[in-house]
Image (spheres, rainbow, N blue to C red):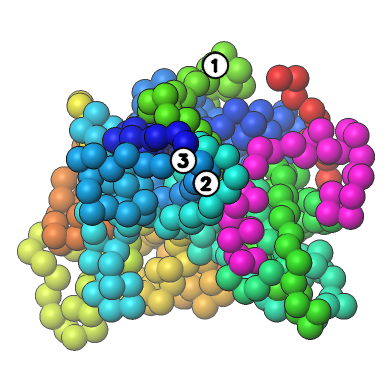
């Protein structure tokens, strides 16, 4: 029987969560680098360049890859020959030990991570402040070690999960192809799809999530050829999805998926449960084993293997001042045009919008000093700063969650434009056009790079909302793309349409 100290388990989980907050897995970087090499869509290529540059900066600076540092998911496989020495941690269960690791990782002063978890999810939605609890899956397995995989799953990609109970005669590939367009770009492609087939409703979801912990090996599979029906299905889904032309950030391009992973399990003769969960540009997971010899040691990646991509503001791109911005100037912006914006931005996301719109609808004043008249809002919930930072990583959040507030924000609050990520709903696009407003996108998954454009930050309203407070940022050359013009033209419609039907196989990268 092997004895594993509870303290080693806690420390290892904490170390692993810090590790994945700033290091992408090597297989993901190899696949993203290969996608960059073959991408022909300028907009998608620029977005991938930002993601790759962000990745290297985060690895060097030990700061989070994305402002959404995720909900922690742990897969813990406990060998039947292992016991945990609970000295100093009496009364705790295995999930409590994982949660203690989460608490320590997310509150590490040198690299504080964003606390995104809210308790009482259907009602009060109170932030737990330390990103606990994790979702911990425990399995008892043969052996005398404890095998742990931890992941930090972004909300934008988790929100796009789908499940269906198909008829046994239905095509899994057809169903996946029917749901991927509904996912839009809020899951920050390029990334992966995890698919779970079989078992029961809840087991299919777990299979899908666990499949995302496997390394990307699509180019190798393509090179050697599919040898099983599941491998054939992977290739079919990758090729058909990439032929949709969605591309990086939904801007239209050759690569939407870097890989598809599938796990299956026997099921009832009457059922065909299928789950699909995407993994985003901030793919974060690591695996380690505890064998009783101490805390896990995670190998530091070799950054010389990161692609030599160094995104910098392009001087040929139109520069826009946010201070004194007019509707006449905005009317000259074209869908898909890249801009570098400078000046003052207000921020706000779900909770702030809810409060602001409630006040406006009730005819009550906004908090002292808060006015959206002729201003631009950035949908963001930043990470707290450390050291000399004015703000931590601060990438965009999914904009369509703010669609229901758009009429009020444009019509009553006097907002000019919005910056977020991914597509807006049809109704919101109509509202934007009716008000002669505009919607811009920044690259999801490039949060540390985007934050370098932020030169000053102050809280303007609702400080009690933490990362959801309204801030004023002063930005210099912040890279954005025009996603919806003042006339209601949407790059998320025109981009994929232009790249639909085209496909390039991602080559194998030498290890
Ligand atoms: S890359 Fe996109 S989906 Fe992933 S955590 Fe960041 S914002 Fe969320």
* Magenta part of the chain: 203-232
Residue 343: image x %, image y %?
29, 42
Upstream in the sequence, badge 1 or badge 3?
3
Residue at the spot 74% in from the left edge and 72% down from the top edge: 267
Task: Indicate whether residue 252 is drawn in magenta.
Answer: no
Residue 293: image x %, image y %?
42, 24
Residue 18: image x %, image y %?
37, 34
Mark 2 = which residue?
80
Residue at the spot 40% in from the left edge and 68% down from the top edge: 402
Horizontal relation, residue 101 to residue 470: left or right: right
Mark 3 = which residue?
82
> Pointers 1 and 3 in contact (CB under 8 A)?
no
Label 1 residue SS: loop
Q: How crowded is mark 1: few (under 14 residues within 10 Å), some or many (20 or more)?
A: few
> Pointers 3 and 2 in contact (CB under 8 A)?
yes
The image quadrant that residue 426 belongs to is bottom right
In the orientation shown, which residue stands out farthest toward the front? 1
In the orientation shown, which residue stands out farthest toward the bottom? 362
**Is the magenta region chiefly helix, strand or loop?**
helix
Mark pair 1, 2: CA separation: 35 Å
**Visible residue check, residue 67:** no
Residue at the spot 13% in from the left edge and 80% down from the top edge: 364
């Amino acid at each position: 029987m092997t004895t594993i100290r509870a303290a080693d388990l806690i420390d290892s989980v904490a170390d692993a969560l810090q590790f994945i907050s700033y290091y992408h897995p090597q297989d993901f970087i190899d696949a993203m680098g290969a996608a960059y090499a073959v991408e022909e869509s300028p907009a998608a290529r620029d977005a991938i360049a930002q993601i790759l540059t962000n990745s290297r900066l985060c690895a060097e600076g030990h700061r989070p890859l994305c402002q959404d540092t995720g909900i922690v998911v742990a897969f813990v496989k406990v060998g039947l020959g292992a016991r945990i020495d609970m000295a100093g941690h009496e009364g705790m269960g295995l999930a409590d030990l994982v949660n203690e690791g989460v608490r320590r990782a997310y509150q590490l002063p040198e690299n504080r991570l964003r606390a995104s978890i809210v308790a009482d999810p259907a009602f009060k939605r109170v932030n737990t402040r330390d990103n606990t609890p994790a979702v911990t899956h425990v399995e008892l397995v043969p052996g005398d070690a404890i095998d742990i995989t931890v992941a930090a799953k972004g909300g934008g990609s988790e929100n796009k999960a789908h499940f269906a109970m198909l008829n046994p005669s239905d095509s899994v590939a057809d169903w996946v192809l029917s749901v991927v367009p509904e996912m839009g770009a809020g899951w920050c492609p390029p990334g992966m799809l995890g698919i779970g087939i079989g078992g029961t409703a809840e087991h299919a979801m777990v299979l899908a999530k666990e499949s995302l912990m496997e390394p990307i090996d699509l180019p190798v599979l393509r090179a050697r050829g599919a040898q099983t029906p599941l491998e054939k299905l992977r290739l079919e889904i990758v090729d058909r999805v990439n032929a949709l032309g969605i591309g990086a950030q939904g801007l239209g391009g050759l690569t939407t998926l870097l890989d598809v992973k599938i796990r299956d399990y026997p099921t009832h003769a009457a059922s065909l449960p299928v789950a699909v969960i995407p993994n985003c540009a901030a793919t974060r997971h690591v695996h380690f084993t505890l064998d009783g010899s101490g805390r896990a040691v995670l190998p530091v990646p070799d950054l010389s293997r990161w692609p030599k991509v160094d995104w910098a503001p392009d001087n040929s791109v139109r520069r826009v001042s946010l201070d004194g911005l007019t509707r006449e100037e905005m009317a000259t912006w074209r869908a898909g045009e890249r801009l570098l914006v400078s000046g003052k931005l207000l921020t706000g996301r779900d909770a702030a919008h809810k409060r602001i719109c409630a006040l406006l609808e009730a005819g009550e004043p906004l908090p002292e000093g808060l006015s959206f008249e002729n201003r631009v809002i950035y949908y963001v919930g930043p990470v707290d700063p450390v050291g000399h930072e004015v703000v931590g990583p601060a990438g965009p959040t999914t904009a369509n969650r703010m669609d229901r507030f758009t009429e009020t924000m444009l019509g009553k609050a006097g907002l000019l434009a919005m910056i977020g990520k991914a597509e807006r709903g049809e109704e919101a696009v109509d509202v934007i056009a009716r008000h002669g407003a505009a919607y811009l996108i920044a690259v999801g998954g490039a949060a540390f790079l985007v934050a370098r454009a932020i030169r000053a930050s102050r809280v303007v309203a609702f400080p009690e909302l933490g990362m959801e407070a309204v801030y004023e940022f002063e930005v210099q050359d912040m890279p954005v793309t025009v996603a919806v013009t003042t006339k209601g033209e949407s790059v998320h419609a025109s981009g994929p349409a232009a790249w639909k039907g085209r496909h390039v196989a991602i080559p194998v990268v030498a290890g």
